[in-house]
Amino acid sequence: MENTVNIFLFGKKYSVPDNLTIMRAMEYAGYQLKRGCGCRNGFCGACATIYRIAGDRELKACLACQTKVEDNMYIATLPFFPLVKQVYDIEKIGPTEQIMMQLYPEIYACIGCNACTKACTQELNVMQYIAYAQRGEYEKCAEESFDCVMCGVCSSRCPAGISHPQVAMLARRLNGKYIAPRCGHLEKRVEEINEGTFKALIEDLLGKPVDEIKELYNNREIEK
Amino acid sequence: MYSENFQESLAKVEAAREKNIELEPRRMTAQEKEELLKAYHPDYKTDEFEVLTIGPNKGDKVPKELAAMLQAHSRINPADIDLSNPDYDVDVLVIGGGGAGSSAAIEAHEAGANVMIVTKLRIGDANTMMAEGGIQAADKENDSPAIHFVDAFGGGHFAAKRELLSKLVCDAPDAILWLSELGVEFDKDAEGNMITTHGGGTSRKRMHAAKDYSGAEIMRTLRDEVLNRKIPVVDFTAAIELILDENGNAAGAVLLNMETEDILIAKAKTVIIATGGAGRMHYQGFPTSNHYGATADGLVLGYRAGAKLLYAETLQYHPTGAAFPEQIFGALVTEKVRSLGAKLINKNGEAFMHPLETRDVSAASIIRECNDRGNGVETGNGLAVWLDTPMIEKIGGEGTIEARIPAMMRMFGKYGIDIRKEPILVYPTLHYQNGGLDISADCMTTNVENLFVAGEAVGGIHGRNRLMGNSLLDIIVFGRSAGKSAAAKCKGVTVGKLSLSHVNEFEKEISDAKIETDMISPKLLPNYVKQRDEK
């Protein structure tokens, strides 16, 4: 009842059940993974993979843990890609246009080929978020890049040598720290705690007999 | 798109949707919950547990798979290890590069310590990265740390160590502020107020989120900060044994390069275990929502060095693991799906429980619905219940799913299921290790000096069950605290002669107790290659 397909792991042929993901197919083939396997759920970007279906011109990219095998799939994993990560002190920089120019000037060499977007394993509009970064529109860059798992496939396809995920990372931190509105109720609560506002309440709970806390718990009011 | 087999049940779910949205299912009483858990929760299946016969928790029950690992042989023979010429010599050695380890390293660095991270995969390869739903903190007007305490204490069956739990809730707002200052993008309204929701068992809406990438957003920011500070990260290197000094204090670790299998020695004044959870042990044969490396390494390292475990017999089964399609079997479906209004529906289209009971109660209730009451949907891979995601769009308006839970939409979308229009199938999945190493409020283990623990490897913060959003919180609060404590402590430490005699002593205990095992531990990675042969 199980159908098999032929896949080619780094060029070598294996027959595997057709319902497996690429990652499971590699394990089925006998690979004990160390590289190229992380959360196995599409969040960590460890299992970036490029493949071509025999006969197709188009080279595709995916996450191995999130993609089913297909017949005649030629597969190569990309467990590491040398992205450029610039070092900075988040306290000493600001959301200025110059900061990108300073840290990641290569983004201005983008030739608009859109290969990054086509390759994105998360189907993000990568070239668009780089355009936002070029213009210093970090809020938009942050939003557009939010689902990035930093697998690096975009950068592997970029003729301008841009490290897109790191550019987006910087934009998101700038946005989170400097551009997004500050949270008044949070700062107020931290201050109250530092002033000892809740000290007595907590100390009371630390010493209260369990039965009394059970009573509190079972009859507590739940916000609608 | 669901095949023909699902259509009959699916039609019932759709027909009842409007009515089910209106319905507010009754919450269970304390007694009902207790009876349900005893009958259906995996923690209560006594034949799945084994009594430890050696070590600091001799006489205690733990899951069979964990017992086998805790009482297994070391990966090394101490006689073969040269401790006289360490490869690394640091103030603070952090084992594990997840949220807790990274937070610890940042704070230790901030305090001026010479700190290093070793991690068996990459920094950020951790359950933190996969935490979707959010992080709790009592920072709103109608809320307080005391209310947060009562919610968590009750949700954990009144078993939490109170000094740890009070630290968790009191330091929570500051943890959120610290993350914000690092640039973590929390969901806020135009005025900067946090957009917060309920989690199972919360009495106030205090779940902060970054869409449904909450953990990923926190983890990638912490990782970026570790790199900005140029804290050394030795990746693809596992700690396989702690090193003590002649006084019995923690003083480093034996490391294994995962690729070359070279052995390296790290000497340190203080050691922080931040190795995370155990989902990849697949207790009781459950699938897991956990990271590939979640094999309870820290528990094994600590136990062999004499550190005590607390509540190691309690695991959390997340009520909503993906049950279909099989490619994502066991993957996490965030509780936030229910926070946003989706209800749990059986095969007859009935909302059989309140969707926001605590996780242990919800998981037990789903197991009962499927395995006892015969109201589960057959998926081809076991039974499951529906989680009616289209309700979210009806309640919150069109576009809510894409804006608030884009990762869920993507995960199912890859297999042709549009969760805005179709419900999804779920069943409990092994999610969290409630228990772990026993610590004091400063994060040092209760019986091994200079050994600190943070994150999922700690036991006792939550008691016997954990509320949603309190784990992302605990890795930050206790990660930071461990980093500060370890950095402060190392100032007064003079490391004595390095020793692995505890490993020899443990081996002797194994043979004295006549334990026959060919297993070695820590396990480091699961072996899924074997499953080929079982096909």
Image (cartoon, grey):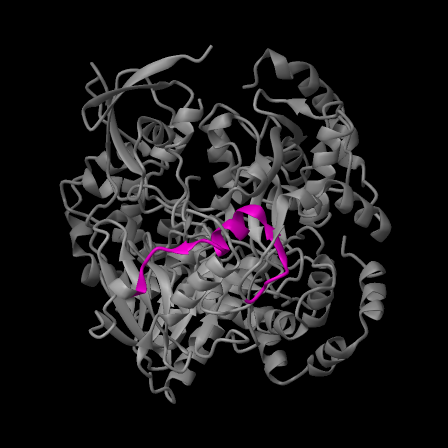
Nearer the observer, A34 or A77: A34
Determine the residue positioned at 39% across, 39% down: B527
Give the image location of residue B399, x and y in percent: 56, 37
Give the image location of residue B52, x and y in percent: 58, 57
| Residue stretch rendered in magenta on the structure | B56-78
Give the image location of residue B343, x and y in percent: 70, 37
Whether residue A119 is visible: yes
Image quadrant in which you'd find residue B389 = top right
Magenta stretch contains residue A63 = no
Query: As drawn, is B34 to the left or to the right of B305?
Result: right
Whether residue A95 is visible: no
Nearer the observer, A82 or A32: A32
Determine the residue positioned at 63% across, 48% down: B49
Measured along the vertical axis of the image, is residue B409 above or below residue B124? Answer: above
Give the image location of residue A22, x and y in percent: 34, 28
Image quadrant in which you'd find residue B159 = bottom right
Measured along the vertical axis of the image, is residue B194 above or below residue A151? Answer: below
Query: As drawn, is B362 to the left or to the right of A75?
Result: right
Query: As drawn, is B172 to the left or to the right of B489?
Result: right
Nearer the observer, A155 or B39: B39
Measured along the vertical axis of the image, is residue B432 above or below residue B484? Answer: above
Measured along the vertical axis of the image, is residue B23 above or below residue A1? Answer: below
Q: Residue furthest bottom?
A: B492
Count of residue discs: 0
Query: As drawn, is B207 to the left or to the right of B123?
Result: right
Magenta stretch contains residue B62 = yes
